[in-house]
Structures are given as C-alpha cells and as structure tokens.
Amino acid sequence: MASDAAVEISRLNFRYGERAILKGINMRIPRGSIVAIMGQSGCGKTTLLRLIGGQLKPTEGDLSVEGHDMKAITPDALYRLRRQMGMLFQFGALFTDLSVFENVAFQMREHTDLSESLIRDLTLLKLQAVGLRGVRDRMPGALSGGMARRVALARAIALDPMIMMYDEPFTGLDPISMGVIAKLIRDLNSALGTTSIIVTHDVQESLRLVDYVYFVSEGVIVAEGTPEEIRSSNLPYVHQFVWGEMDGPVPFHYPAPSMQDFLAGNSPHSRRSMHA
Amino acid sequence: MNRATLNLWVGVFVVGGFIALLFLAFKVGNFSSGNLGETYSVVAHFDNIGGLKASAPVKSSGVLVGRVVSIQFDTKKYDALVTMRLDKRIPFSTDTMASVLTSGILGEQYVGLETGGEPEMLKDGGEVSHTQGAVVLEKLIGQFFLSKSQEPADATK
Amino acid sequence: MLNKTRQELENVGRMSLDLVSGIGAVFVFLLLTLRYSATSFQRFSLTIREIFFSGVLSLIIILVSGLFVGMVLGLQGYETLQTYGSSESVGVLVALSLTRELGPVVSALLFASRAGSAITAEIGLMKATEQLSAMEMMAINPIARVVGPRFWGGVLSMPILTAMFIGTGVLGGYIIAVLLIGVDSGAFWSQMNAAVDFSHDVVNGLLKSFVFGLAICSIATYQGYAAAPTAEGVSGATTRTVVSSSLAILALDLVLTAFMLKG
C-alpha cells in the first residue's frame, strides 16, 4: 500500500488458450488521475479492463490494484475490493427487469443495511447528479442510449467507488450526450478524487479529458504520454490514430490476394465461385 | 408488474395447485381408502399366491377391509407368507378362510376373507390358518383333460 | 472405404464424448447453483417473482393442453373400451394414463418450451448485454442472484403445473365421457377411485415431474449462462434448451418408470 498508485501493472502477459492477447504490459495509474487506454477495436483494451476488475487472471506478470495482488487474491477479498470499484459498461448493462430507480439502488440493497428512506434519498441524489431524477420510474428499455449510459453511471457510483472504469463510454452517443458524460467523468474525478480508467477509441473527446494516455496496438503498448505529447507525437501509428488517417502503419486493406489475380480467376476464392 | 399483484398471482397459483392435489388425492385417487386408520396385522400361508402384489387390497364380501403389506417366502414350510393389515373395527374369527382371488377375468388379484363360526377373534399378529391359493390356469386345464380322458372309459363300459 | 468408416467411427466417438461432457457440464453447474441457493430462500421474494414468470405464465398453456389431452383420451378410450363392453372404465384409463405418464411428461415438455426457453433467453440476454458482468463487478454473485431464483422458481412450479394438468385432464375426460357420451357418472368416478392409488400413481407422477423440473431448470439455466454473448448465441442456446430438455425428459421418464414399476 506504500505506493500512491491505484493500479500497477508490470510485464503482464495474457493469453486466451494459445492466442496472446496482451504482451508485456507495463502501466502505472496514480490515485486520483484520469487515464485513457486507447487503441483500435480488438486490440485488448477491454481485456485489460477485465484484468483490473479481476474478471480475468493474468497469465504471467504482476498486477496489483489498491495494493492487492490480483493473481493471488481470494474470491472473498476480490468481492470486497470490487465494492470499491465501479464500472461503466459499453452499453450501460442496466438490469432490464428493474426500473431506473431500482437499478441505481441495487448495490445499496445488496450490500448495505441502510434504511429504505436513506436508500431512497441516496438513490435520488445519484440520479440527480446525472440529471435524470425525472426518469426514476421508467424501465431501462424506455431510455435513449445516452440516458441509459447516464443511469448506468449513476449506478456505478452508487457506493462512491475509489476506482472507476469506463468501457467505451462515448461509443454510439451523439455529441451532446458525449459532452455530458465527459463532464460527469471529470466532475466525479474532482469531487470524489476517484481514479478513473477510460478505455476508448474516441481520441478527441478523451484527449480533452484525461491526464495520461496509453496506446495499445496488438497487445503491446506502442505509445504513452500526456495529451500534449500525444497530439504532437510523430510516431506513425499514433499520428494515424489521432488524426484518423485512412492509411498508415495500419493498412486500409485487410491482407488478401492481389486484385489482378482475383480478376484473372487465379485465386482460390474466385475459382470456387465459378464452379458454383 | 406490481409487487402485490405478483404475490397475489403466485398465491392463487399455489392454492390452485393445492386444490388440484386434493382433487387427485380424494376424487381421482383413493387416498382415503388407502389410509385405513388403525389396523392390526395378520399373516397367512398360501401354497401359491399367483400374481398377488404388496399393497393389493384385502376384501371381504367385496368390501375393502385391508391391504397386503408384504409377501415373503417361508423357507421352513416352502410356501408364501403374506402379511396383511386389517381395519381394527372389523374383527375376523380365528377360523377365517383366506383365498387369493381375481377381480373379473383379467383384473388384479386380491385376498378374499370369509369369516368362520368360532367365537374367538384374530389378534394382532395372528395367523389365518385356512387358506386357498391362487388358481393356476394350467393346473385347471390339466385337471379338466384328466377328468375328460377318464370319462369315455367309464361310458364305454 | 476404410477411411470413411474410420471417419464415421470418429464422429460417433466425438458425439458420445460431447454428450457425456455436456451432461457433466450441466451437472457441475447444477451443483454450483445448489451451492449458492441460500439467497433464493433467504430472499424468497426473488424466487416468488420467478414462480410468477415460470409457473403462473405457463398456466394457460398447461390448463388448455391438459383439458384437450384429457378429452382426446376420453374419446379414444371410450371407442376402444366400448368394443369390450366396459366403457365405464374410461375414467380409469384417462386417470391412470394422466397420473402415471402423460401428466408428468406432457406438462414437462410444455414447460421446457414455455418456461425453460424463456429462462435461457433471459439469462443469455443478460449475459450478452453484460448485465451478468456488471453484477460480478458489483461484487454480487450472478449465480446466487440471477440463476438461483430462476432455477428454484421453475423447480417449485413444475409439480404444481403437473397436478393442475392432470386435474384438468381428468375433467376433460369427464366432460367427454360423462357429459357428452353419457357414460354413467357414478361408475366413472368410482372405478377411477378404486384403480388409482394415491401413493403409487399420484405421488409417483408428481415425483417424476419434480425430477423433470430439476432437469429442465438446470439445462435451461446452464444454457443461458454458457451461451455465446451474441444474438445467434442466445437463439442457439434457446433451441438447445428445448431439444436437450425434451430428450432428457423422455430418457429420465424411462429410467424413473422402470424404477417405480420395480419398487
């Protein structure tokens, strides 16, 4: 517990069977900071989040969260630790069979012995914080995507977590909702001192928001730095990613036999279609 | 769905299930007659029980008075030992006759009791000494042919 | 030729292994569910909710099917028994077929396709929309909170539904045989009453349905929990629930019937 890092990762490897997802990740997330993990879809960002949340165990290397070694943690200790963590899932993951109010009150009911009136006040307070006290009686199915994400945020912060994890918080949102979520993340961070980890591929929005950025590509960290450093980076991959260029280290074309071969009928694909 | 409405429906559901069970127990099944109340047990030796099974009815004049509890093989007498439970309110004399009978042509087999003339009554654990086993169809046919084959010999005389 | 035979043998071997490992996986999941079942009973309101969704919502299909099955049995039984001049025994035929076999088996098959598939779809969808992950991240065990109540709600509903199925079936037989055809009402009931043994027939029938309920609910919850978190994954899992529960019901029925007739 001596260090002031909420999350420390060193030389971490993670494999799904034979497939290596993460290779030699080193990361240090100080308490109270907002850190973004960026990269293309399928580069292992979400896996990293799941490792921090203890839903997956590292294959090799060290991973400690709030001083707990996640490789050796017991289920009980993990459950205790998770009460101090909040996670905002990509599409909110609201419980579809519970109303908005019950969704936010869920953890309080499950984990605390608070009185019904206190739960009510706290829940409405959290809903007020995301500006959605007015939809307390709606079912999640009757919410727009942005509203659902905000309710999910209210639910995630219900027990005032020390670490908040955001899995693609901006995906599929209109610019206004995006701005609202970004503001909420920042407010939460400054008001409660919450450590925030944001996994995203939305560059411009997150560069405005965060203290530090890690770039992940194909399971390795290819770049890291403050938003200014990233913006001015000359690394081809980062440049391509930040400015959204079509071609670069990441090619536009998925590997395929050349077009001429295809038209000439030499590729196995075209031959099969001719027989058919 | 409202919590109270939900509870109400589940309550109705459970009560409905209970009513169905009662219906099955008393109207469809013979829960009442299967349960004889207070009973006493008697045993009987049969040379042949045929297809008699445990829990088969014990009847007297066609009225259910008890049930077969168990059927064992007696290795001393080399015959079947049948234990029955009879209704306590219905006493039988010690010279009661027990026979293995069949209800209808293909019906199930049961034990029929016919009380005798002795003034003394069977006690709990007593034995019915006069018994008649099940009629075996093969033997019956055999006897029939035997008597038939003897008849013409008499007639030609 | 030899190669083909070999390949077919390999297929048979793989299918048998899949079957055994599938049964094993369901069984392990059942044990896991039982281990975390305390929540289902300590907070019985969670289970009551699931009894509503599994039991009460299956009532219509169970009652209507029971009525029709009983009516058909009454008609068919009457036609057959009439040739032997014992049409009064139609009550016995209806009641015995329902209590011993048709009641437990048909109501379980209906339950598997009505409630079992719904359980799989619901749990699978909760997985696909990360609700189960979210619960885990909130330090709440989804098996205790989501699977347990659904499992027990279904298991408790099944015998109740079967009892109702048999009850309405007998009434259906009564309607056809007595009210429409004109079999003597007294003979109908008394013969039935004499032939149907409560502990032998009714209790055994309900015992069967309890076992079927266990099988359906463990298969349904397992399939939902193990479903691939996509639309295809959930729909495939739903189909698998109905198919494998139906097979499990019929196979278990054979085993249970053999044991009950012996005992």
Image (spheres, grey):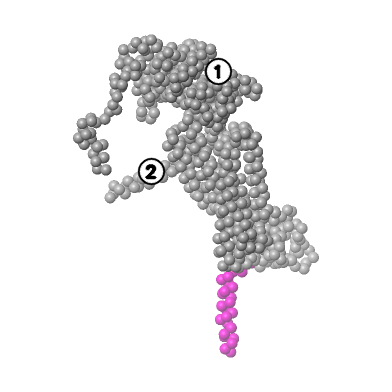
Circle 2: residue type: Arg
Q: Crowding at label 1, few (<14), some or many (≥20) Cα neighbours within 10 Å?
A: some
Tell me, for residue C211, which label it has, or none: none
| Horizontal side of residue A69 vs C148, given as left or right | left
Q: A229 or A247, which is in the foreground?
A: A247
Q: Decide: few, some or many residues near mark 2? Use Cα within 10 Å; few <14, some 14-19, many ≥20.
A: few
Q: Kindly identify which residue carries mark 1.
A: A129
Q: Residue furthest bottom?
A: B157
Give the farthest residue toward the left: A264
State the extent of the magenta-drawn residues as a range: B133-157
Along the line of sight, the residue nearer the viewer: A24 or A60:
A24
For image coordinates 44% across by 19% down, the residue present is: A175
Residue indicated by mark 2: C14
Residue B141 place in picture, x, y as percent:
57, 74
- What SS does tag 2 mark? helix
**Viewer-proximal residue, A276 or B113?**
A276
